[in-house]
Amino acid sequence: MPEFFINGQPVHAEKGQTVMQAALAAGFFIPYFCWHPQLSVAGNCRVCVVEVEGEGGGGSWSDIACNMPVSEGMRVLTDSETVREQRKQILQFILLNHPVDCGICDKAGECMLQDHHYTYNGEPSISTVPKVRATKYHQLSERIVLDNERCIVCSRCVRFTREISKSHGLAIQNRGDHSLVRAVEDGRFESDPYSDNVVDICPVGALLSRQFLHKARVWYLQATPSVCPGCARGCTVNLWHRKREWKLNHLDPQQNTEIARVTPLENPAVNGPWICNKGRDLARVFGRPRAEQPMLKGRLATLEEAAAAARRLIGQARAPVALVSSWGSNEELAAFKDALGDRFSCFVKADHQPAADEVVHDELLIRADKNPNTATAQQLFGSAPPAFADGTDLVLVWGEGFDFSALPRGAKVIFLGSYLAPENGYADVFVPLSIQTERAGHYTNCDGHTSRFERLFAKPPGVADAEQLFARLAVAAEVA
Ligand code: SF4
Ligand code: SF4
């Protein structure tokens, strides 16, 4: 474990660490653009330059911290006058052809170039010749656009597709100030299921999500920690939504209760700093038309009436079966087990199956089970596939994914769902349930890691929380 010195303070580094890694681990700040902890070292932006003091009073020299291994006793200065002057020159160079159109750039507010410019440069361009113009709106894929004028050619995006997603979907063509990031021509980037991660890791506003393009300034949004329910990996995510203090009253108030964007919430035990594109599209999953009204055989009812009718059916049933949701939280599944687990023969149901156009399973994150909590559901209710014994006279269906044509003949149905569906009106009792964004809870993923999701929005008035509903439905059999 070599010991070296940063700004005169002793620092212990791990064997093989670079100055950048050891400095960041010890709490020293060194700016960077092209370096990324999960990618190989490119060393092209040079902004992580540091000064290394010569031994025995010898002359010092400058080098980039991202590519310099720590050696015993070396003395590094991260913020000397020389370093600040060199960083200033580097930023002047990087900004030479940059349009500085922060006022219309989606990255404004979370742009590393803005931050480093104001820290180390903060002056107008020294150039006296016109800036080199480049493509302002290049559609890299259905999901992503590229502003080549803002690109600082750090190559993070290219390395991501080579080293992480392994689609090899991006490359840099031409040289110097004519360099252009481009997608390779066989559609590999278009079909890369992790492509949107390049928007996050682009240190400037060159790569932009088309979904989010010009939708909101990031300082109007807040991030709420959540878990992607798209597959059994259970990636932790941030769901971005409008801050309460920036609530819109007249202009498009729907934005107040919508997910504006989804980004990864770094979690080394589950997903690292990445998520797949399906996770980015959660707004579409949660934004489907909601069922907000309880029903009794298609007739509108109150929650009290629906709960009372469900209790009656449960009490009268001789052989009731429950199909338990694999989208239920740990808390909801435990509540069901406590309240109704002994009354029903319980089977775990897959609420979602792989869609025709999605990657079913891969080596990185995506799992074939498209449900977030099969692990807990099976732990509590077993892994036998759903089956109806002769005489089944009541079926409680919790969540999506069940084909109602498979119901046993003559059986009564209690359906607990969240979205508008024809089955809602068919059920003897239908109770609408809150969705993940309207409650807090935990999911346990395919590897046994448990992650928490928080509440973002209030649930609609006619909708029940499953945990409380199950306690209300606990009833003993009325028949022997
Ligand atoms: S598009 Fe962004 S990530 Fe890619 S090379 Fe340019 S600046 Fe770097
Ligand atoms: S890998 Fe699974 S859990 Fe992770 S973002 Fe994609 S769908 Fe969601």
Image (cartoon, helix red, strand yellow):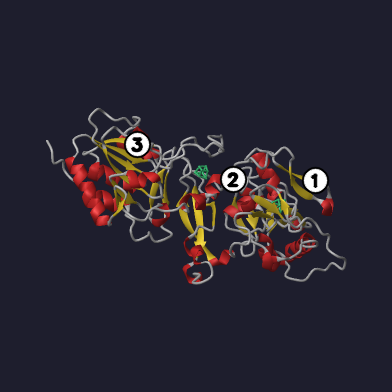
Residue at the location (37% across, 60% down)? 460
Foreground residue among 408 and 260: 408
- Tell me the number on the disc at residue 14: 2
- Tell me the number on the disc at residue 348: 3
Residue type marked 3: Val
Foreground residue among 387 and 146: 387
Instruction: Estimate how packed mark 1 is, as few (under 14), some (14 to 19) or many (20 or more) residues with alpha carbons within 10 Å.
Output: few
* Element on which disc 3 rests: strand
Residue type marked 2: Glu
Query: Does the beta carbon at disc 2 come under 8 Å from ligand 1?
Result: no
- Tag in front: 2 or 3: 3
Residue 71: x and y, percent?
67, 47
The residue at which mark 1 appears reads as 173
Q: Residue furthest right?
A: 129
Specify which label sits upstream in the sequence, 1 or 3: 1
Q: Quadrant of residue 382?
A: top left
Q: Is residue 199 in view from this perspective?
A: yes
* Element on which disc 1 rests: strand
Q: Residue furthest left?
A: 480
Specify which label sits upstream in the sequence, 1 or 2: 2
